[in-house]
Image (spheres, helix red, strand yellow):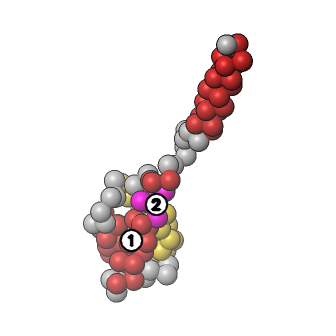
Amino acid sequence: MKLRTALLAGLTACALLITTGCAVTRDQETVGSYIDDSVITSTVKSRFFDDKSVDGSAVSVETLNGTVILSGFAKNANEKKTAESIAWKVKGVKAVKNDLLVR
């Protein structure tokens, strides 16, 4: 009986260690949100290349938890505004941080 209790306690301890080792900690993304973010990034980037008023090669796009971060250079204020507008229209975008510099 003592052996069975000890074995059960050991298995329970192992199960707890394994499941908590996979827990998401602060400032980390889950696998699902990482995939969603990469889809958003790819979609925004492809829409930049489809729209001739935005130079897709000069704009960097990153996404974290649904927030799109635009960085790089825009030729003018209109291009900067258009890039932000395109990003907002992508499904799943919760916020857009436009850090494009006009040169």
Q: Nearer the viewer, residue 4 or 24?
A: 4
Which residue is label 2 attached to? 35
* Residue at figure coordinates x 44%, y 53% from the top left: 33
Q: Nearer the viewer, residue 68 or 35?
A: 35
Q: CA distance from mark 2 to mark 1?
A: 14 Å
Residue 36 forms part of the magenta stretch = yes
Q: Nearer the viewer, residue 10 or 39?
A: 10
Q: Residue furthest front?
A: 1
Lower sequence index among marks 2 and 1: 2
Label 2 amino acid? Ile
Judging from the image, what secondary structure is the residue with disc 1 in? helix
**Secondary structure character of the magenta stretch overall:** helix
Question: 101 above or below 13?
Answer: below
Image height of 7 relative to 85, above or below: above
| Residue 53 position by quadrant | bottom left
- Looking at the image, can residue 34 be seen? yes
| Residue range (magenta) | 34-38
- Which disc number belongs to residue 32? none
Residue 102 visible at all:
no
Side of 14 where 66 appears, left or right: left
Q: Which residue is mark 1?
A: 44
Q: Is residue 22 left or right of residue 97?
A: right
